[in-house]
Amino acid sequence: METTESFTQYKSRINESLGNEFLRTAMDNFAVAYRTARKKAFSDIDVDALIQEVAAIKSDAILNHELLLKQFISKAKENGIHIHPAKTAQDANRIIATIAEQTGSKKIIKSKSMTAEEIHLNRYLENKGLEVTETDLGEWIVQLRQEGPSHMVMPAIHLSRYQVADLFSKETRKDQSNEIEKLVKVARKQLREKFVKADMGITGANYALAQTGTIGIVSNEGNARLVTTWPRVHVALLGIDKILPSIIEALTINKVLPKNATGQAITSYVTWITGPSECKNMAIENKNVPTASIKKPGQKREMHIVLLDNGRKAIAEDPLFAQVLQCVRGGACANVCPVYRMVGGHSLGYVYIGAIGLITTYFFHGRENAANLVQNCTNCGACKAVCAGGINLPYLIKEIHSKILDETGHPLKSLLLGKVLKNRKLFHSLLRTASLAQKPVTGGTPYLRHLPMIFSKEHNFRTLPAITDTPFRDRFKKHYKPPANPKLKIAVFSGCVQDFVYPEQLEAAMALLKRADVGVAFPMDQSCCGLPAMMMGEKQAARDVALQNINAFKDLDVDYIVSLCASCASHLKNHLPDLVRDYAQNDQEIFSDKVIPFSRFVVDKIGVTFEENGQASGKTAFHSPCHLCRGLGVKKEPKILINASGHQYVKTDEEETCCGFGGSFSANFPTISNEILTRKLDDVENSGADLLVTECPGCVMQLRGGALKQNRNFKVKHISEIIQPTSKLS
Amino acid sequence: MDKEQTLSIFKQKASLASAIVHEEGQIKEALNKAVALCLAKPFCENLMPKNNEPAEQKMIAAPNLNPQEYKILDDLCQQNDFLLINDDLRNHPGGLEMGITTINCGIAETGTLVLNSDSEETRLATMLCETHVAILKANDIYQTTQDAAQVLNDLLKQPSSYTAFITGASRTADIERVLTLGVHGPLELHIILIGE
Ligand code: SF4
Ligand code: SF4
C-alpha cells in the first residue's frame, strides 16, 4: 500500500519542481506558445459558440447515457464486438487480463489512453507476467522512466532531449544522439518490432457512437492505427462518458478538441472502427515474422470493448458534478493554469492533470490523493475560460475542497476563520485590535516590516501592508455628505481589504463620485464578501456572510452596488445566487444583478472623456484581475479609464495572467505564489512601464508587496487612485 | 462557396498540415507522378533488419487501385524496376518505399483525406510506407466534415468498417514540443489531385 502524502511532503515535492530549471523553462515556453497557437487555431471560428455547442452535446449525452449506452452495446454486439461493462477499476483490469489469458496473448502493445492510466492497467498486467509496451512516443518515454504522464496529451513535456537521449541509450545499449529527429527514429525502429510481435493491442477511444456502434480514436503518431491493425486481438478501454449519439456530434467535438488541446486544426489521424476488422493470417509462408498467432486467411481480429464506470454513473446522477463528464480530455485547463506553469503535471495532478485533475482525483483516486491537490488553485478561472467542455472548473474545485473538509473535519485555522467571518462585529473588532497590535512591527510605516511570528520565512516574499488606524467605514460615517440632487444612487460594497487596509482607494473613488453627483450609501452591516471562506473550503461560512450581506443591502433604494474589489464583485455576482438560493427570503433580495465593478460603472454610467493634454505618467501597464476579466468579462473599461485619466496604457503579454494571490492560496503555497508573482513583475518591467494599475485590492497587495520587496522600478496603484482630479466627466 | 474556393482551401489546409499537394490531370498522370517521386526517393530505412533482407528493389504497395489503374502502375513499376506488391504486406514490417491509395473523399476545412481502410492491405499500405501518395478527385472534396456527414455515416455503418481520416504525415511533438514528422507512419504525405 502506498502511504498518503502529507501536506508538508506535498509542499516539498512542489519546491523540488520549482527548482527544476528545465521544467520551468519548458512550462513557461509552452504556456506562451499555447496561448498564441490556440488563438490562431480559432481565428476564423466563434470559439465560445462552438464550445457551448460541445458542452450541450456532452451534457445531453450524459443525461441520456443509459439509453445511448444500451443502443451502443446492442449495435456493437451486432457488429461482432465483445462488450464488457466494468463497474470498477479492478473489474476492468481483471477483464482485460482474462481476455489476454483466453486469447493466449503474452505481448501487448498500447496506444495512449488516460483511462488506462486511471485504472493503472499496465501495472496490473505486468504483475500478471504480461509484457506491455506503450507505443505513443511520450508514453513510451515515461513508461521507460517508470513514471506517469505529466500532461494528458504531452506525457513527456517535463523532459529534455538530453534526458530522452540518455534513456534511449540505456534502452538500446547504444549511444544515441540528442537530436530530436534522430531520437524519434530510434522510437520508430525500436517500437516496430514490438508491434510485429504483439498478440494484443489496447487502445482508448475518444468517441463511442451509439447509432453505428463505432469507436473513434484521435491520434497524431499513427501508433493507434498499428495497434488496431497488427495484433490479432484488439481491446478498447473507454469510460462510459465517451458515449455520443452519432458521428455528427463527434465531428463537432472534433472541431474543438485538437485546436483547444495544442492549437492543431486536426490530428493527423482520426480512426473510426465499427467492429472487428480484417486481420490476415500472420503465419503464411512467413518464417521471418515472429508471432504467436496463427489465424486462417480472411478472418477478422477479435475485438473487445471494456466500458468503464468507476464512479462515472454516480457522477452523472449528481446535479452539481455531472458536468465533470463533459470533459473531452484535451488538457487545455492545464495549459493555461498559472500553477501548472510553475510546477508541471506531476505536482498538479495524480493521474488526471490540471484543473480537471483537481476535481476527478477525488472521484477516481480517492480523497486521500485529492486532499492536498485540491488546495493548489488560485481560483483564477483561466481553465474555465478555455475548457472545451464548458465546465465550471474553479467552482467545482472549491466544491470538492469543501466536500473533503466536510468529510475529514475542518482544520482549526479554517474553522476559526469561518467562525470569525460569521460574526461581523467580532471580525471587525479583531481587525481593529490587530491594527494596534501591529504598531511595533510596522515601525510607524504603512508596511509590515517584519512579519509576525505566525508566518514562516517563505511567506516573506512580499511586503505586506499594515492594517489602517481608521477603516473606511469610520471615515465614511464621519465625513460623508450626500449631494442635494444626486444623478444616480449607489451603494458601495467595500470588502474587508479596502475597508481595513486600503481605505485610500475608496476615498479616491469617493472624490470622483462626488464630482459626478452620485449619491453613495455605505451599509455598516456589510461584511466580508465570503470569497476567502469559499477559498478555504468553508462553504457554510461563505453562505452565512452572504446572507448577512443580503440583509445589510436589503432595503436600500439604489441603482447600483459598486465594488472596487473585482474579487468581491465577481463573487457577489457569480456565486452568491447559488450559495443562498435555498436560504434567502426571495430572489429580489439577492442583489447580484445590481453589482457592478468600479471601472465599468465609471465608464458606462458616469462617463469620462479623454483628457487633452494631461500626461500623468510614462507608460502604464494594467494587471487585469482574474475576477475582473474572466469573472466579470470586463476588459476594455479599465484601459479607457487609464487613457482618459491622462496615462498612457501599454499592453503587456501577461496582462490577464493571475498574479498568484488567490487569498489563502498564497498563504498555503507561498513559493508558487512568489514564482507566479515574479513572472508577472518581469513582464511589467519588460514593457517599460513606470506604473502598474489594477482593480482589486488583493492584487494590489500582492503586486505592490512584490514590487517593493524586489525593488522593481515601477509603482503599483489601484485604478481609483490614478484618476486625476482634472479628468473630465461627461 | 464554389468548387474553386473549396479546392483552394483544401490545398492550403493540407499544405499547412505538412502534406505536399500536386495537381496532375488524370489518374494516369497521377501514377506517373507517384512513380517519379519513388524514383527520386532514397531506399527506405529497414526498421526490422533482423527479419527482412536488405531490399534490392524499391517497393510500392497499391492495394486499393482498380484493375485498370493497377495495370498502368504495374507497367510503370516494371519500367523502373520497382516491386509492386498488393498482398500480405504483413511480410514487410521493415517498411516500404511507397504506398499509393485512391481516396474516398477530401475535407477542405482541415485538408483531410477520408479513406475506407476495411482491407488490411489498404491499412498497412498507408502505415508501413515511408511515402504515402494519396490520389484524390478534386470533385470529391467537401467543404466541411458536416457536409460529408452522410458519406461518412454510410462508411461507418458497415460492420467491420475501418475508416481513416488522414491529415498530413504521421507526427509527434513529444520531445520538447518540437514537431517531427514520421513516427509510426509515413514520413511524407503527397496528395495528387486529379480531374474526373
Ligand atoms: S482556477 Fe486557475 S489556478 Fe485554479 S485550476 Fe483553474 S487555471 Fe489553475
Ligand atoms: S476539463 Fe475542459 S479544458 Fe480540461 S481537459 Fe477537460 S475539456 Fe479540456
Image: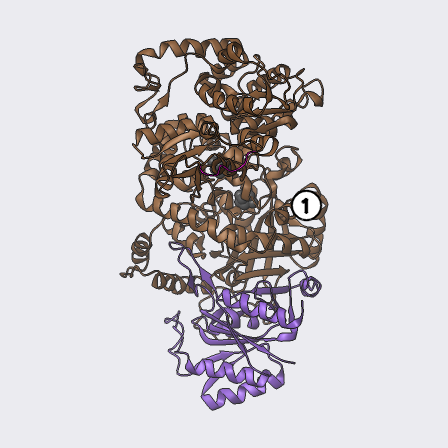
What is the chain letter for disc 1?
A
Rendered-image quadrant of the C terminus of chain A: top right
Q: Amino acid at mark 1?
A: Ala
Residues A694 and A97: in front is A694
Would residue B9 be counted in the magenta stretch? no
The main secondary structure of the magenta stretch is: loop
Q: Colour of chain B?
A: purple
In the rendered structure, the colour chosen for chain A is brown
Say which element carries label 1: helix
Observer-nearest of A168 and A554: A554
Say if B172 sits above or below B94 in the image: above
Considering only vertical position in the picture, is B111 above or below B175? below
Which residue bears the numbered disc 1?
A61
Please tell me which residue lies in front, A169 or A299.
Answer: A169
Is any part of residue A343 visible from this angle?
no
Q: Where does residue B42 sit, x and y in percent of width and height?
A: 39, 78
- Vertical relation: A509 (above or below) B88: above
Horizontal and vertical percent for residue B140?
A: 65, 72
> Which quadrant does the N terminus of chain A fall into?
top left
Q: Please tell me whether residue A693 is drawn above or below residue A72 in the rendered image.
A: above
Mark yes or no: residue A567 visible: yes
- Is residue A610 magenta-colored? yes
**Towards the viewer: A439 or A522:** A522
Query: Residue A383 at what x, y percent from top left?
Result: 52, 40
Q: Quadrant of residue A87?
A: top right
Residues rendered magenta in the picture: A608-613
